[in-house]
Image (cartoon, rainbow, N blue to C red):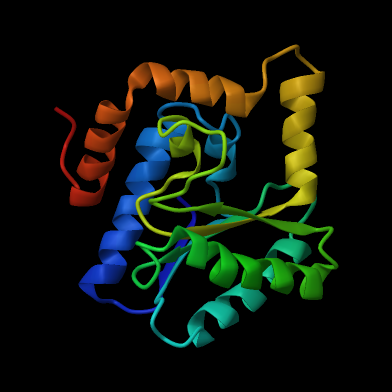
Amino acid sequence: VGTVRASSDGAAARDARDATTRWLTDVIIGMNLCPFARASMAKTFAIEVVRGDDGGGGYGDVLARETRRLAACARDESATTLIVFENGWNDDWEGFMRGPVREAEDACEATTGGETVTVVPFHPLAAFDGESEASNYTSRSPFPTVHLLRACDIERAEDTWYRLEEREDIRERNAEYLEALGVRELRRLWARIVANDAPT
């Protein structure tokens, strides 16, 4: 992983950082849910751990800094940031969408006109209409997470995945894989990631 920063050096921040790193390694990359993630985890990749109970000040500062950083990165070099909440939003998916996610969208619009940096939310309880519980794990993470990524990187990845080769939709493929894995196994995996247990 590239840069990892935290708002505090406490146990909660370390737990959020470590669980997020394991989730990226074991799930996103290990299960190939995002075929482009491995290449992105370089020097321009960052994990920022913030508190959810600081009145939003720390989060707002990180948002402003990271949207500017991503917008300034060279277009030929992948750049992305995960902003992870160590506390405050774990049990409130809808509130997370209305609060931090909307704030991130507003920050991207204000900083880059909404055309350079975009927002993808992840959450322990992420759920979407029409999706099964297993397929919802495509958007679940051990801690509430706001993913900032650039439109040019999305376009480049889609060019590689969809247009240069005939492949199925990534989300549909992931949903099929997770359905086959099963909710029980997914819950066990998530519990292991959060608890920092070794695979059995």
Q: Residue at x 46, y 33 (%)?
A: 29
Which quadrant holds the C terminus?
A: top left
Left of 7 or right of it: where is 176? right
Q: Residue at x 30, y 55 (%)?
A: 18
Q: Position of residue 145 (x, y in %)?
A: 48, 58
Left of 141 or right of it: where is 35? right
Q: Position of residue 164 (x, y in %)?
A: 80, 18
On screen, residue 196 above or below 72 = above
On screen, residue 92 above or below 1 = below
On screen, residue 111 above or below 20 = below
Please state which of residues 42 and 103 is positioned toward the viewer in this rendering: 103
Left of 109 or right of it: where is 184? left
Please indicate, yes or no, whether residue 76 appears anywhere in the rendered image: no
Q: Position of residue 32 (x, y in %)?
A: 49, 27
Q: Residue at x 67, y 16 (%)?
A: 168
Q: Residue at x 50, y 18 (%)?
A: 176
Tell me where residue 15 sits by quadrant: bottom left
On screen, residue 141 above or below 5 = above
Left of 44 or right of it: where is 194? left
Can you name the residue that lies furthest to the front here? Answer: 130
Tell me where residue 61 sits by quadrant: bottom right
Q: Position of residue 177 (x, y in %)?
A: 45, 19
Please indicate, yes or no, whether residue 7 appears anywhere in the rendered image: yes
